[in-house]
Image (tube, helix red, strand yellow):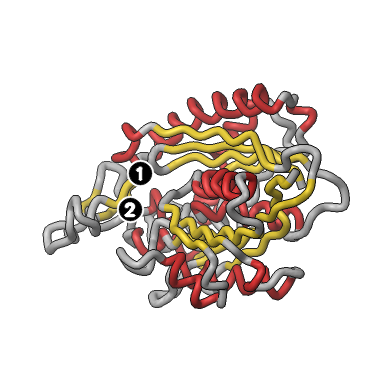
Amino acid sequence: MNYAKIKCLAYHLPAARLDNDTLAGLYAGWTAEKIFEKTGVRYRHIAKSDETASDLAYLAAKSLFSENPVQPDDIDFLLFCTQEPDYFLPSSACILQERLGLPRSCGAIDVSQGCSGYVYSLGLAKGLIESGQANNILLLTGDTYSKFIHPLDKSVRTLFGDAGSASLISATDSKVPLIGPCIFGTDGRGAERLIVRTGAFRNERDDSSAVALEDASGNIRSHDNLYMDGPDVLTFCLREVPRLFESLLLRSGLEVSDIDFFVFHQGSGLMLDMLRKKLKVPSDKFIIDLEETGNTVSSTIPVTLARLTGGKPPERTATIMLIGFGVGYSWAGSIARF
């Protein structure tokens, strides 16, 4: 039977880097090492003012095509996961189809999802392939949260970076599923806890929305900027991720010892360390890899996978648990076999 499989991956990071020494100079009482201790990040890559999320995804896709035996003509569906589209309309996926030279017979849609978005999109790709609707899916991610962040908001500027990724998901003749089970969850009560309040149609931007105020912790931001309630996000993650973790093990019939690597959304070093200890996962299996990238939102899982595997299938079969969680609130998990 044809099952969906992650065949290869690539990613792109913007050239500009923002390091902890630079940030420490902006925030009184903070040092570069203190920032690293709080976030697990030493520097993050930042998109140029005229560089969009679709630009980062485009460059990741170009790398995928140049480094692997797949060409644009092979693609019959494009999924682009982003929360920063080029325009309200048309979809950025349609623009990327033309820009990458994909066939006109190719489907193309945007997926407006954040930290859980890669696993959500992986589930969509699996469904398209295993229902016979597509054979080769180009799954792109791209986020540029830096464009939402006030430069004096240390609660988020120290954490987030920009990136794009590209994954080829293909139909493969196999006796067993190579992606799945896929489990999803949503709790819209958390919408206000991680949000950019203005800019769309619920609350349009105006002169008053751009006024920046200082909060009790000394962070400065306006309603036009990204807001994150860090303590509530952490509470949400420590509550829902263990439930998802146990559900994945139960649904897949696997034990922790059966899984080679655990690749979770790279939210922050502190959060990941707390999750690893709570889940009792050996440190050599639990991948923490955001020191050189920061939290790149929908790209954290594919970037980590690409760095872990070199973008190619490993020499032996590897079973990897993927878990994304965050903005929405939303969460998603799956098992991928390489």
Asked whether disc 1 touches disc 2, contact meaning CB atoms under 8 Å apart, the reply is yes
Q: Which mark is residue 275?
A: none
Quadrant housing residue 134: bottom right
Q: Earlier in the sequence, mark 1 or mark 2?
A: 1
Residue 124: percent from left, percent from top: 54, 47
Q: Which mark is residue 194?
A: 1
Mark 2 neighbour class, 10 Å CA radius: few under 14, some 14 to 19, many 20 or more: many
- Identified at 30% across, 64% down, the residue is 88
Residue 28: percent from left, percent from top: 37, 55
Q: Is residue 87 left or right of residue 281?
A: left
Mark 1 neighbour class, 10 Å CA radius: few under 14, some 14 to 19, many 20 or more: some
Q: Secondary structure at mark 1?
A: strand
Amino acid under disc 2: Leu
Q: In front: 183, or 189?
A: 183
Which quarter of the figure is the N terminus placed in? top right
Amino acid under disc 1: Leu
The number of callouts visible is 2
Q: Is residue 122 left or right of residue 335?
A: left
Q: Is residue 34 left or right of residue 315?
A: left
- Identified at 48% across, 62% down, the residue is 108
Residue 18: percent from left, percent from top: 50, 66
Q: Secondary structure at mark 2?
A: strand
Outermost residue toward the right in this view: 315
The answer to whether residue 225 of the structure is visible from this angle is yes
- Identified at 47% across, 52% down, the residue is 159
Q: Which mark is residue 226?
A: 2
